[in-house]
Amino acid sequence: MREFSEAWKRHSGDFWGGFAAMLVALPASVAFGVTVYSAVAPHYAAFGALAGVLGAMALGLIAPTFGGTDRLITSPCAPAAAVLSAFAIEMVRQGVAPASIVLMMTVLGILTGVIQILIGFLGVGRLIKFIPYPVVSGYLSGVGLIIIGSQIPKITGVETGAGWFEVLLSPQTWDWRGLAIGGVTVVVMFVSGRFIKSVPPTITGIVAGILTYAGIAVANPSMLELEGNSLVIGALGATGEGYIGLITDRWFQIGELKLSQVAGLVGSAVTLAALLSIDTLKTCVVLDQLTRTRHDSDRELAAQGLGNIVASTIGGMPGAGTMGASMVSYSSGAETRISGIVSGVLTVI
């Protein structure tokens, strides 16, 4: 009992830091997963939510166990969501079947992890920190514009599969309800971060959008029906068996991929590995400055790569050491890497 009491005194900060970080990282992970898988097909949104949870779980357990950076929280992140969403959008544009897109994203995540491990073992991690931020910012900005373009028809409520430019030139096709709901969601996300520090802006924006939809539905009861309603995804049709089947089916289909298809993913995997590595090392550098410590870049990247391999293997989202959740962990009293493991364990629970 005395040993337990002493251990609790030493690591209570890690528990509360990991708990607080989980409350921030998990909702964001779910949102990132939904964003990526919704780009594949609307009815894949539920599988995206599961991918976010599985990614947060695997990364939270693997990366801090083998990594060496104290207080670092690893989970699905914005760069991963941006690159995978753009990848999915391009595959849909080429007419690739949704199941094949999901399979290729799984292989892409595994290749990304392998490349990160190679970067770590080859000692290149220390060099990644010198990549200019404008290069990374420019790339992510370009990817962000692609995603925004794909969402314009959805936020305007246009039912046809028209491109974003065509939609913008045809305001008569817009649905004011979609504009109102989407507009409120975006505005609240931007504004709430300045006034509400305890709740992530993503959550407040989603809640505000749902309340707006419910308010408009009071005057228009047809919005409460799924059939013929262009503003909702519709029935997801996802069960526990469906989740397991989706994940296991990928591995039966892996052998059907041609070597040329896998080789075609290498370029995207290198890009994703570089972005996730930069995101991780940027967070590590900030933590070093706050705690007057020094992280091991190569060891951390190898651990991140292993985490991404495991996450992708079980159908989860890849990710990186995230700034927001790590800062929450630090400010909540975390002192060691146990806080990251606690975050992963609580995600499982």
Image: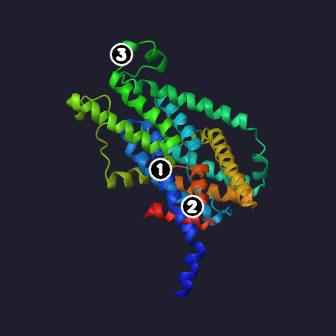
Instruction: Name the amino acid, label 3.
Output: Thr
Q: Can residue 32 be seen?
A: no
Find residue 124 and report its horizontal and vertical position in percent: 77, 51
Q: Which residue position holds label 2? A: 332
Q: Report crowding for label 2: few under 14, some 14 to 19, many 20 or more residues within 10 A (C-alpha).
A: some
Q: Report crowding for label 1: few under 14, some 14 to 19, many 20 or more residues within 10 A (C-alpha).
A: many
Residue at left 60%, top 75%? Answer: 10
Looking at the image, tell me whether mark 1 or mark 2 is earlier in sequence order: 1
| Residue 274 in which image quadrant | top right
Find residue 245 and report its horizontal and vertical position in percent: 37, 53
Find residue 299 and report its horizontal and vertical position in percent: 71, 60
Residue at left 69%, top 46%? Answer: 278
Secondary structure under the numbered disc 1 in the rendered image: helix
Residue nearest the observer in this picture, 1 or 33: 1
Frontmost of labels 2 and 3 is 2
The reply, left or right, for residue 171 in relation to residue 85 is: left
> Which residue in the rendered view is the most extreme toward the bottom?
2
Q: Which residue position holds label 1? A: 52
Q: Can residue 185 be seen?
A: yes
Instruction: Name the amino acid, label 1.
Output: Gly
Q: Are marks 1 and 3 in contact (CB under 8 Å)?
A: no
Secondary structure under the numbered disc 3 in the rendered image: helix
| Residue 331 in which image quadrant | bottom right
